[in-house]
Amino acid sequence: MKVSFEWLSEYVSLDQVSAEELAEKITRSGIEIDEVEQRNQGITGVVVGYVKSKEKHPDADKLNVCIVDAGQEEDLQIVCGAKNVDAGQKVPVAVVGAKLPGDFHIKKAKLRGVVSMGMICSAKELGMNDKLLPKELQEGILVLPEDAEIGMPITKLLALDDKVLDFDLTPNRSDCLSMHGAAYEVSAILGRDISLADPAKDLVEISNAAADHLSVKVDTPELCTHYAARYITGVKVAASPLWIQNRLMAAGVRPINNIVDITNYVMLEYGQPLHAFDADKLENGNIEVRLARAGETLITLDDQERKLEPHMLLITDGVKPIALAGVMGGANSEVTDATVSIALESAKFDGGTVRKTSRQLGLRSEASLRFEKEVDPGAVVPAVNRAAALIQRYAGGTVHQGIVESASAKAENRIIKLSLDKINRYLGTELSLLEVKTIFGRLHFGCGDAEQGVLEVEVPTRRGDITIDVDLIEEVARLYGYDNIPTTPIEGPTTPGALTASQSLRRSLRRLLAHGGWQETISYSFVHPQSTGLFNALTEGSHPVRLAMPMSEDRSVLRTSIIPQMLDTAVYNMNRKQDNLAIFEMGTVFYTEEQTLTRQPQEIQVLSLLLTGVRREKQWNIGAEKVDFFDIKGALETVFDYFGLSASIRYVADQPQSYHPGRSASVWLDVNGNSQRIGTIGQIHPELQQSYGLNDTYVAEIALQQVVEHANSHIQFRELARFPSVERDIALVVNKDVEAGELLRVIHAAGGELLQDARVFDVFTGSKLGEDKKSVAISLTYRHWEHTLTDEEINAAHTPVVTSLEQTFGAELRK
């Protein structure tokens, strides 16, 4: 809201207070002032002049030689190139010695041999925003009203010495979307009286009743609680007075004609939007407020045809729509130069309905802005009376007796009870009853004597943001002064901040992978429905969660796995010649066990990995090496080893959905006798890989909750071994379906404290071994930390290992 300092001073005395000082006080009281705009952009020496004559320049077709009376001792000869300059006009004249915006100085000059003693100015040359001028004044020089006084400084005539305060209002302070609201605020801040004129003081009505010419019907009283209309005849549409135009332009509103300008002026003054209909274009003078019907259209004042929907509130004449309530009028009832009778509307429309309509149609206006934030219901009648009085005075209108209205709710002040003790307890102050009542008096809130320490405060309708007692406490705080409220040291025990176990693990995991050469990605939680059918081993048997109001079909479902988005990332990079990728993402996947969602969906924190390309580039002496299953498995093993879970993890050959049937596995966590699947790992299915256009790509996805619960990232250091280790190699012939991991598990269980390590170093199959047989060669390392092992000790540890393998798997030792 742009508030004119000069206009504001009509309501509240601003003596000895500059615009800058006032802006600082308002900001400190809770409403930020973005800037104080100086309307005078650097004009001196520009006055009103009268063009006595105009002659063609003898040596230039596009120049004119004008004789101008500028209130000087002698008339001035000025050469002017504007097309619209003419004799008999009042114009702004920059005399010799004047200065224009941009530090442009006017000097005596000679143009094509003719002396020019000044300059006739356009609005743009005066530093004015010509887009805010009436259309007929936007081109060429600025033509002033005929009654402008010759020699008057142009800054006084156009109110350019005024300053404008730009109020940056929060949605709750819609009361300050008006000059009256701003005046009440300034009055409270400065503690000075406010003077507001009676809107109907100068209004003269004729005995002919408005109700004989207009009728008002509201079909939706819940969406229009009050509709008031006045009937005015004999109007003469013309330009509005210059003082009204000046104030409109200071507020950023372009003047149009006296009728429209007056409705805009009163809107700025009271915060109550008004609209004027050409009454002769209404069917039998009917005004009906209703919701739109399917298929209806309306051509609005901007000459655009609008398709209406049933939730949009309309003003009609019983036959056709004539306006979008609270948003914009219709072209079929527009006030034109031929208009002689008008129906003047003032109403209280539902803010939510206006907001929905204006946003859907892309129509944001000064009126809709105010209705969206809710207007003062008590201003409906005063505003229409004020506008009628101005139209009567400046458009020659005859105001018919009475207001034709429909009201379903009465505007009443709100009574709120508040105790002095609560005010001081909340603010940490020791304010007296007199101080509190004085503050409410400055706000023009009624306040009687406190009974048993409780005040009854009467809040006027203009302050719709104040509904409960703490709102009043906030008013006391800001007017008492936030700087005056004593500071209170924080007392009591303090608790240092810390990360949860889950947060700490994720942070460590992110650092571990990043240091290992992996790059982190971040993707949307919203995906295409097709993505939820892929890689859903962790959410198997559940249902995806569909959004009620998705931004698009591609973002309409909550993801059940991160892997599909990582594949999209891989495709994006490969299309840009980035074929070697090692990426990871930690995030949340979602699912529900309900067909129809009635409660909060389940969420799982997961770690997802993707690996593709080569682990080593081709060089002169070696070939390129592609990544394989064991590279991504090694990355997972590094993670589990870091968190002390290596001994509890096993990989079981499996065929999870969307994985390669022969190069994939499930990841199981065995703790305290319980075994649960926590993830999947492997190459993506060849058909899926082909559909994405990817090279061999390996992925893994692990649920992090179980990792958090059982992780032991505490690192225990010990000295380096001083005694040598001993290695024993064995080759076992077992059935082909026996997994090497199961062999190692049995070896570790039987090896005792001396067994330090066991690893597979060879697998062999052949006809000599027998059908469905294979040979697995395993190297076992034994060590004692306090002495060198003897053969007897080694055999004592090694024999149980061999025995367990023979008994568990029927293994045979190869000689």
Image (cartoon, rainbow, N blue to C red):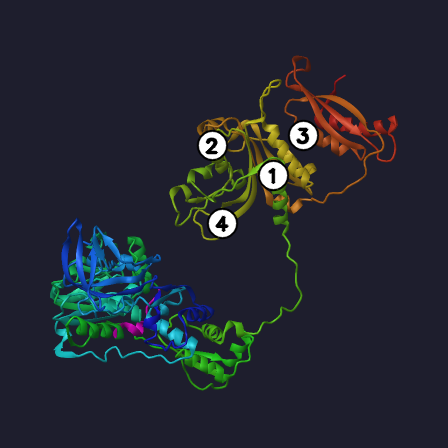
Q: Earlier in the sequence, mark 1 or mark 3?
A: 1
Residue 306 at x, y = what percent?
23, 52
Q: Nearer the viewer, mark 2 or mark 4?
A: 2
Query: Does the CB distance between marks 3 and 2 fall below 8 Å?
Result: no
Q: CA distance from mark 3 to mark 4?
A: 37 Å
Tell me the kind of residue under disc 3.
Gly
The residue labelled by disc 3 is 741
Closer-to-camera residue (376/444): 444
Query: Magenta span has 375?
Result: yes
**Image quadrant in which you'd find residue 721:** top right
- Mark 3 crowdedness (10 Å alpha carbons): few <14, some 14-19, many ≥20: some
Q: Is 1 situated left or right of 523 in this image? A: left
The residue labelled by disc 4 is 601
Camera sees residue 524: yes
The residue labelled by disc 2 is 571
Q: Which mark is residue 514?
A: 1
Q: Earlier in the sequence, mark 2 or mark 1?
A: 1
Query: Does the CB distance between marks 4 and 1 fall below 8 Å?
Result: no
Q: Is 738 situated left or right of 190 in this image? A: right
Q: Nearer the viewer, mark 2 or mark 1?
A: 1
Looking at the rendered image, the quarter that the N terminus falls into is bottom left
Q: CA distance from mark 2 to mark 4?
A: 30 Å
Q: Earlier in the sequence, mark 3 or mark 2?
A: 2
Query: Does the CB distance between marks 1 and 3 fall below 8 Å?
Result: no
Q: CA distance from mark 1 to mark 3?
A: 29 Å
Residue 85 at x, y = what percent?
17, 57
Tell me the kind of residue under disc 2.
Val
The stretch of residues the image draws in magenta is: 373-381
- Mark 2 crowdedness (10 Å alpha carbons): few <14, some 14-19, many ≥20: some
